[in-house]
Image (spheres, rainbow, N blue to C red):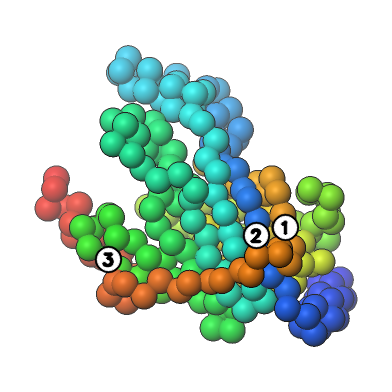
Amino acid sequence: MKNSLLLLCLFLITSAYSQTKLTGIVHYESGISQQNIDNYFSIERKTLKNKKRIAFMDNLLLNSKKIASTLQFTLNDAIYKVNKKLTIKDRGDITEKMNLIAAGGLNKYYQNRNKNSLEIQNCITLGECFIIVSKFKKWQLTQETKKIAGYLCYKATTVVKLNKKTINITAWYCPQIPVSFGPKDYNGLPGLVLEVQNNFRYFRATKLVLNPKEKVRIKKPTKGKRVSQEEYNKMSKTAWSKIK
């Protein structure tokens, strides 16, 4: 019943906004989650025996820089990408490289509300360009709220499987801004996602500009072979097996 009332309110807000040309730019920062750091130092670190491995993990978790990224959106579509590009210098710093890749790397994340779809352009991992197509995530909505950057946000949760590991995801979305977009591949909620936390990483909005003076133009990535997420996973698995 509570979820039904919430969805009704969100529908009414969305209808009001649909009469206008809502656009915006969201600036995010991301980094390694405190949960990941706490879990490593309280449990995992004690199980490691290789000193070089311990030193690497200590450096990765304690000294990684925050990564800046940007989401541009209209009512119907959006695109997310990391601001900084990998340089020759960064490629020599494995911790910086891993941090940038975890935040989105060189990929472009195109999100379309009408098709309920996410299209990720990846031209790096397999040596050629692919556009990986999938659907928006499905979420469990809750009544829990908190304010982020001055906006009232609601909590939503979901669970995904990655390499046989269970990833718990918590997102905070703002019904006041009725678009289904968020950082990276965190989308599908009845409001703009301003914060995400999972087992490993967090994304947090640091600045939000609604209806900026300069027109927001969403350029959909077109270069690359279109494949499903399942097809791409199979190709990646085959490629890695050949390397090993």
Horizontal relation, residue 93 to residue 179: left or right: left
Q: Which residue is mark 2?
A: 25
Horizontal side of residue 130 vs 67, given as left or right: left
Disc 1 element: strand
Residue 72 spot, x, y in % from top left: 59, 63
State the mark number for residue 129: 3
Instruction: From this view, report whether residue 122 is shown above or below residue 8.
Output: above
- Of residues 221 and 126, which is closer to you in this image? 221
As drawn, the label of residue 150 is none
Q: Residue furthest top?
A: 51
Q: Name the residue beneath numbered marker 1.
A: 209
Give the residue drawn at x 27%, y 55%: 125
Q: How many marks?
A: 3
Q: Quadrant of residue 21?
A: bottom right
Real-space Cα separation, disc 2 to disc 3, in angstroms: 26 Å
Q: Are there few (<14), some (14-19), or many (20+) residues within 10 Å of tag 3?
A: some
How packed mark 2 is, by other alpha carbons closer than 10 Å (few <14, some 14-19, many 20 or more), is many
Whether the residues at callouts 3 and 1 have beta carbons within 8 Å, the answer is no
**Residue 74 as seen in the image, left or right of residue 10:** left
- N-terminal of the pair, mark 3 or mark 1, is 3
Horizontal arrangement in the rendering, residue 227 relative to residue 127 (left or right): right
Marks 1/2 in contact by CB < 8 Å: the verdict is: yes
Where the N terminus falls, by quadrant?
Answer: bottom right
Q: Which residue type carries mark 2? A: Ile
Q: What kind of residue is marked 3?
A: Cys
| Disc 2 secondary structure class | strand
Q: Separation of disc 1 and disc 2 at Cα?
A: 5 Å
